[in-house]
Amino acid sequence: MAIKQYPIEKSVRYFWISIGVFTLAVIFDIISGLGVVNAIARLFDSKPTIILTEPLVKPKKIITKKEDVIIPSTMNDPYKDLQAIVDGKEIPEKYKDIIIDSHHLNVDSNPSIGELLNITVDKYSTYLELFQAGITQHEMYPEDDWVVQKLLHKLATKTIKHAYEKEGGTQFKMIVKYSDGYRAMFKPMRNTRTQQKNINHFYFNDYERHNGEIAAYHLDKILKFRRAVPIVGRSINLTSELFPVADDELFHTFYISPAGKVCFTGRCDTYCDSFHGICGNPHMLEGSFAAYLPRDKRAYRKVWRSPWRRSYDKRRLNPWEVDDNYCQIVRKIPPYDSGRRMLDMMDMAILDFFIGNEDRHHYETFKTFNENDTFIIHLDHGRSFGLPFHDNLPILSPVKQCCMIRKSTLKTLLDFHNGEKKLSAALNDSMKSDPLSPVLWEPHLEALDRRNVIILETIRNCIKKVD
Ligand SMILES: Nc1ncnc2c1ncn2[C@@H]1O[C@H](COP(=O)(O)OP(=O)(O)OP(=O)(O)O)[C@@H](O)[C@H]1O
Ligand SMILES: [Mn+2]
């Protein structure tokens, strides 16, 4: 029997038919959402992500009522062990990798943006110009700064000349322009003070809170970080202050609600429709006004992905969420292996734990300075202060996993814990100057003192490991 030979043309045809079938299969897979291709692609994906068929971490009890709050058993412990280390002349050798005695302001040079970019300021400069030129390599503004106070007063009182929606980002934000070159970034009020975050919603579904932005600025300041953008609250009349100065695009999204309130939607990607309208009462709307960061190209910001970011996928966890040794990888990678960056990450985790912010996907630094040795800008705290009766422990993971904290930060925390004025009272006092005072619902303030103890306990556990 003769063996049947396939001519070359036939092989080529089969080849193309196979390619066609494969392509159709891929398209079907994508459209149907079966995810076969995706699963294969993940085998070659170097990103260390974890795919869950069911939640890996069982939903923990989330406390939403005051009666259920867990007060740490060490609430009244003066933490003398930690206090002794902080008060001592030198950190004992065995604790030197945990409590780091290196302060970013104890440096020979701390140039400002004004100095590096040859920006001259004089008596005609506005407070915004003074603030922007005065940002230094190591802090947003100096201690006891008067410029920021004056600037915030301007942002809270000056007549708004022009307003338009800021592109990019997910939720509605607006750029507000005043006379004399003053500018602010505005986020509107979406929730009442007592509204808690929906516990079945992910952080990426949470509305941004304007009062969270204001409170986080004050907290960053009293914790002596001074890395947050100065922010002030203000109530504006939508009909007389915003409607007439809104640009065409924004103007066309205004409407009157069935209840007779003045509302607008904006055009952003998320929650910019009449189902989520931003409404006055009936005309007045609160918002946060953030001092505008420098617009000079040379003072632009570099955006970094946070090593401790969440996955932003409802079925996936990132490696740090399942691997307590994750920090050992991070600390070897530049810029986390030297300079101030890792210590800044710890401070930022502490700030985020206090305010309950899970949304730190990226962070920014000013390009003007040595990019590996300048402060992390504390920016975007809209998703904070949502659950006063629940302390979100995973947010503190960087500190728990790295077992590392600046001595100065630990001292500040101990001072609040043991001092006459607790952190809750200090924040309350600081925020009294804001036009929207009271900025926070009382239980959010109480939560700070509780969370402070949880941080101290985390550090104590680190110390115990080397004792
Ligand atoms: N005060 C400011 N001055 C200038 N630019 C700013 C200011 N605040 C924020 N921005 C810029 O706008 C971007 C978006 O701001 P922000 O992160 O607060 O909004 P967001 O809606 O939460 O964004 P995303 O959805 O991306 O998290 C920031 O990444 C930053 O670069
Ligand atoms: Mn955000």
Image (cartoon, rainbow, N blue to C red):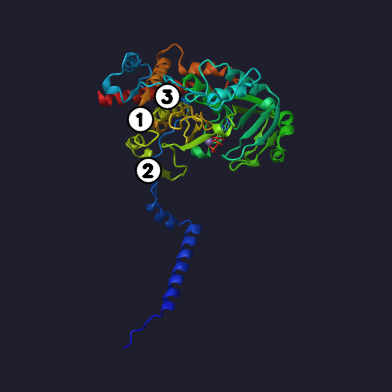
Name the residue carrying label 1.
400
- Residue at the (42%, 57%) spot, across then down: 36
> Dot 2: what SS?
loop
Name the residue carrying label 2.
56
Of residues 459 and 390, the one nearer the viewer is 459
> Dot 3: what SS?
helix
Of residues 67 and 358, the one nearer the viewer is 358
> Residue 133 location, x and y as percent?
57, 24
Q: Earlier in the sequence, mark 3 or mark 2?
A: 2
Of residues 123 and 446, the one nearer the viewer is 123
Query: Which circle, 1 or 2, is nearer the viewer?
Result: 1
Ligand 2 near label 3 (Cβ, under 8 Å)? no
Report whether 69 appears left or right of 181: left
Vertical relation: 45 (above or below) 276: below
Q: Quadrant of the N terminus?
A: bottom left
Report whether 240 appears left or right of 345: right
Which amino acid type is shown beneath numbered disc 1?
A: Lys
Location of residue 124 by image quarter: top right
Report whether 173 appears left or right of 179: left
Vertical relation: 72 (above or below) 299: above
Q: Residues within 10 Å of mark 2 (few under 14, many from 20)?
A: some
Q: Is residue 283 visible?
A: no
Q: Quadrant of ligand 1?
A: top right
Name the residue carrying label 3.
451
> Residue 408 location, x and y as percent?
40, 19
Which amino acid type is shown beneath numbered disc 2?
A: Leu
